[in-house]
Image: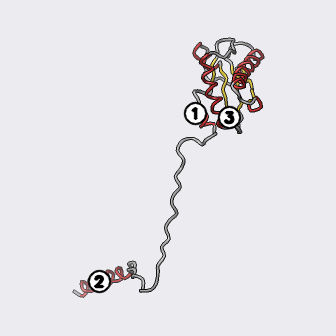
Amino acid sequence: MNRSLLLAGLAATTLTLGACASKPKQLPPEPGTTTTTTQAPPQTQQPMGPVPGSQADFIASVISDTVNFDTDRYNIDAADQGVLQSQASWLARYPAKRVTIEGHCDERGTRDYNIALGERRANAAKNYLVSLGVDPARVTVVSYGKERPLALGSDEGSWAKNRRAVTVTVN
């Protein structure tokens, strides 16, 4: 019996101490005093979409960053003109931006031949942009020849994807 009484007393003490440990109630302010509350600063909303003027914005804003060519060709056809016109429009919106046009070829032909052909492709795209009013000082060209294929494979589908000029923003 003493043991049961001791356990009951211990439980009552534990409950009483637990109730005392709870957070004290906050009393209202005394009359004549003012209270100030601080609010968290409003969260700034993250911008949606790519950063204006970035490579991601360029990709999202133009028809394509790539102009494709036929075998052993570097002429700008009607489809290429539309792509380059959209690029020129984007460049007009961001006059401080510069671009590099990369010339590429498929795996056929010698390294030297493809470097020269890639340069002619990049220059053809540059010259068309310049004819649309883009300052030539804003456009540089580089030829990678067959060194950076987009598609691996030795078939017409892969070769067609690799015959290209790609515009990349640089600053």
Q: Secondary structure at mark 2?
A: helix
Residue type at tag 1: Ser
Q: Is residue 110 above or below residue 122?
A: above
Give the residue at x 38% y 80%: 25
Q: Is 71 placed left or right of 116 in the picture?
A: left
- Tell me what residue is drawn at x 58 percent, y 33 percent: 61
Instruction: Name the element at disc 1.
Output: helix
Residue at which label 3 appears: 169
The image quarter containing residue 155 is top right
Q: CA distance from mark 2 to mark 1?
A: 73 Å
Give the percent coordinates (x, y) of residue 161.
60, 19
Q: Quadrant of the C terminus?
A: top right
| Residue placed furthest toward the left | 1
Quarter of image, res 144:
top right
Residue occupying the point 50% across, 65% down: 40
Q: Earlier in the sequence, mark 2 or mark 1?
A: 2
Q: Which residue is at the front of the view, 69 or 19?
A: 69
Amino acid at the residue labelled 3: Thr
First of labels 3, 2 by sequence position: 2
Report the residue marked by disc 1: 61
Which amino acid type is marked by label 2? Ala
Q: Nearer the viewer, residue 6 or 134?
A: 134
Residue that label 2 marks:
12
Real-space Cα distance between discs 3 and 1?
A: 13 Å
- Residue 36 percent across, percent down from the top left: 48, 76
